[in-house]
Amino acid sequence: MTELGKRPRALVWLLAITLSLVVAHLLDGWATGFRLPDVYEKDWGRLLRVMGFAPTWLLIAVAISLQESAGRQRDPKTRSTWHVMVIAMIVGGLGSEVLKLLIRRERPGDSGDYQFRSFAEDPFSTRGLGMPSGHTMVAFTGAAAIGRRFPRAAPVLYGLAVGCGATRILAHAHFLSDVTAAAIGGTLAGRWAARPIEKQDQPT
C-alpha cells in the first residue's frame, strides 16, 4: 500500500479510536451500575482475569517454544512468535504502568465520579490508579500479538481479552473508559510487537 493510501486508513482508525474513547467516557456512569462483587469467586471469572496476568502469556510462550524444539526442524514462525510474545508483554505491561503514572486517574469510588491524584502524592506508585486497566491491556496485548501471527486464533483470544476487561468492570475495579483505553493500547502494542517479525516472513 502506498503512503497516500495509508493516510486515509490511518485517519479512519484515529477517528474510530477517538470516538470509542468518547463514547466510553459518556457511558462510564451507566456501566458502573453493573456490579458482580464475587465475580472472581467463580471459575469463569478467575479464568478471564488470569488472561490479564503477564505470566499466563509467558507460559503460553514456553509451550510454543517446547513445541518448536520438539519438531525435527525449527519452524521460523513459531520461533518468531516466542520472541513477539516476550516483547509484547514487556511493552504492554510497562506501558500500562507508565500511562497510569501520567494520567493519574483513580479507580472508581462509591460515588462513581472521576478522581485524580496529584503528582506530589506518591508520584511513582500506581496503587489505586485505574487508567488504563493493566489486566485488560496485558490481555489485549497478548491477544493482538498472537492474533496477528495466527489470524484464525484471533477471535478466541480477543474474546478472552474482552471477557477479562468485562470482569474488571463487574468487580468495580475500573471504569468502562479504563478498559476501553487499555483495549486500544494493548491492541496497538501487540500488533506493533508482531510487525517487525511479520515483515521478515514476507517474500522478497
Image: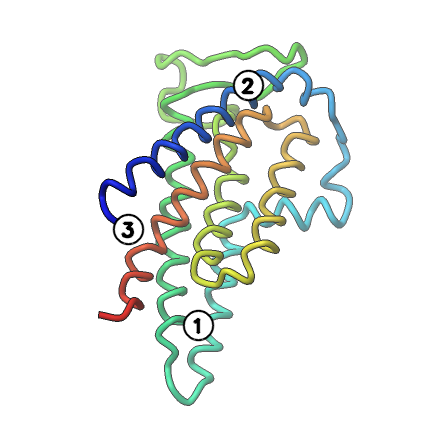
Kind of element beneath mark 1: helix
| Separation of residues labelled 1 and 3 (CA atoms) | 33 Å
Residue drawn where x is 36% and y is 14% of the image: 119
Distance from the alpha carbon under mark 3 to that under mark 2: 34 Å
| CB under 8 Å between discs 1 and 3 | no
Residue indicated by mark 1: 65
Residue 156, quarter of the rendered image: bottom right
Q: Do the residues labelled 3 and 2 touch (CB within 8 Å)?
A: no
**Residue appearing at x 72%, y 41% in the figure:** 40
Q: In which quarter of the image is residue 109?
A: top right
Image color mode: rainbow
Q: Which amino acid does label 3 sit on?
A: Met
Callout 3 secondary element? loop
Q: Residue 25 carries which label?
A: 2
Picture quarter containing residue 26?
top right
Q: What residue type is labelled 2?
A: His
Viewer-proximal residue, 51 or 12? 12
Residue 137 location in percent, x, y? 49, 40
- Number of the front mark, 3 or 2: 3
Give the mark toward the camera: 1 or 2. 2
Residue 1, label in figure: 3
On the rendered structure, is 34 left or right of 58?
Answer: right
Please name the amino acid that badge 1 sits on: Ser
Element class at badge 2:
helix
Q: Residue 140's spot in the image, x, y percent?
A: 50, 45
Estimate how packed mark 2 is, as few (under 14), some (14 to 19) or many (20 or more) residues with alpha carbons within 10 Å: some
**How far across and down, in percent of the image, does residue 86 sit?**
38, 57
Locate residue 52, reporting x and y percent: 55, 45
Whichever of callouts 1 and 3 sits on the residue coming sooner in the sequence is 3
Mark with earlier residue (3, 2): 3
Q: Distance between the residues labelled 1 and 2?
A: 41 Å
Please say if 196 is above or below 126.
Answer: below
